[in-house]
Image (cartoon, helix red, strand yellow):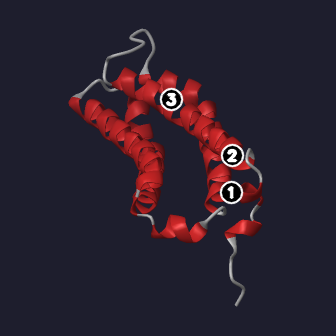
C-alpha cells in the first residue's frame, strides 16, 4: 500500500497555493450562502418586500449553483493537502455533516417552501433552519484550524 506524504502535495510546496485555494473556496461559499441568505431573509420578511421568495429563488439559483460547484471542486483540493489531519478533525467532520444537511435541505424543503410564496410560520421556520445550517458550516470551517 502506498503511503501518502503531504510534503509531495503542490498545495504544501508553494507559499501561495494553499491560501489561493482557500480564497477560491471561501468565494464559492460566499456566492452560495449569500444567494441562499437573500431568499431566507425574504422568507423572514426582513428584505426585498416587493419580490416574492419564488422569484428571488429563481434569480439567485445560478449564483447558488455556481457557488456550490466552486466549493465542491475546491474543497477536495484543500482536503488533499493533509487528508489524515482533516479526517481526524472533529470540526471538519461536523462541517461535512452540516454541509450535506444544508445542501439537501436547500434543494428539498427550502426550495419547496420558497416556491410556494407562503409567508407563514412554516416559511419563517424553514428560513431560520436554513440560516442555522449554513452558519454552522461556516463556523465549523473556521474551527478546523483550532481543533
Q: Nearer the viewer, mark 1 or mark 3?
A: 1
Helix or strand or loop: what does disc 1 sit on? helix
Q: Which residue is mark 3?
A: 34
Q: Nearer the viewer, mark 2 or mark 3?
A: 2
- Residue at the outermost bottom position: 1
Whole-number angstrom distance, CA of label 1 to CA of label 3? 23 Å
State which tag comes first along the sequence, 2 or 1: 2
**Horizontal and vertical percent for residue 74?**
67, 50
Helix or strand or loop: what does disc 2 sit on? helix
**Horizontal and vertical percent for residue 64?**
57, 35
Image quadrant holding the C terminus, namely bottom left
Q: Which residue is mark 1?
A: 77
- Asked whether 110 or 2 is in front, the reply is 2
Whole-number angstrom distance, CA of label 2 to CA of label 1? 8 Å
Q: Is residue 43 above or below residue 127?
A: above
The reply, left or right, for residue 69 in relation to residue 145 is right
Query: Residue at position x 58%, y 39% from top?
Result: 26
Q: Which residue is mark 2?
A: 21
- Asked whether 136 or 6 is in front, the reply is 6
Query: Residue at position x 52%, y 29% from top?
Result: 35
Q: Are marks 2 and 1 in contact (CB under 8 Å)?
A: yes
**Horizontal and vertical percent for residue 129?**
31, 40
Helix or strand or loop: what does disc 3 sit on? helix
Name which quarter of the figure residue 9 lies in. bottom right
What is the crowding at mark 1: few (fewer than 14 residues within 10 Å), some, or many (at least 20)?
some
Name which quarter of the figure residue 24 lies in. top right
- Asked whether 71 or 52 is in front, the reply is 71
State which tag comes first along the sequence, 2 or 3: 2
Amino acid at each position: 500500500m502506498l503511503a501518502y506524504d503531504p510534503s509531495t502535495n503542490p498545495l504544501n510546496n508553494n507559499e501561495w497555493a494553499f491560501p489561493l485555494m482557500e480564497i477560491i473556496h471561501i468565494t464559492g461559499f460566499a456566492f452560495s450562502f449569500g444567494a441562499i441568505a437573500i431568499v431566507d431573509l425574504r422568507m423572514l420578511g426582513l428584505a426585498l418586500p416587493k419580490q416574492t421568495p419564488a422569484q428571488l429563488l429563481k434569480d439567485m439559483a445560478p449564483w447558488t449553483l455556481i457557488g456550490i460547484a466552486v466549493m465542491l471542486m475546491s474543497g477536495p483540493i484543500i482536503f488533499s493537502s493533509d487528508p489524515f489531519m482533516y479526517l481526524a478533525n472533529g470540526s471538519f467532520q461536523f462541517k461535512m455533516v452540516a454541509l450535506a444537511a444544508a445542501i439537501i435541505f436547500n434543494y428539498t424543503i427550502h426550495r419547496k417552501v420558497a416556491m410556494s410564496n407562503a409567508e407563514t410560520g412554516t416559511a419563517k421556520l424553514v428560513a431560520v433552519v436554513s440560516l442555522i445550517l449554513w452558519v454552522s458550516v461556516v463556523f465549523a470551517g473556521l474551527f478546523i484550524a483550532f481543533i
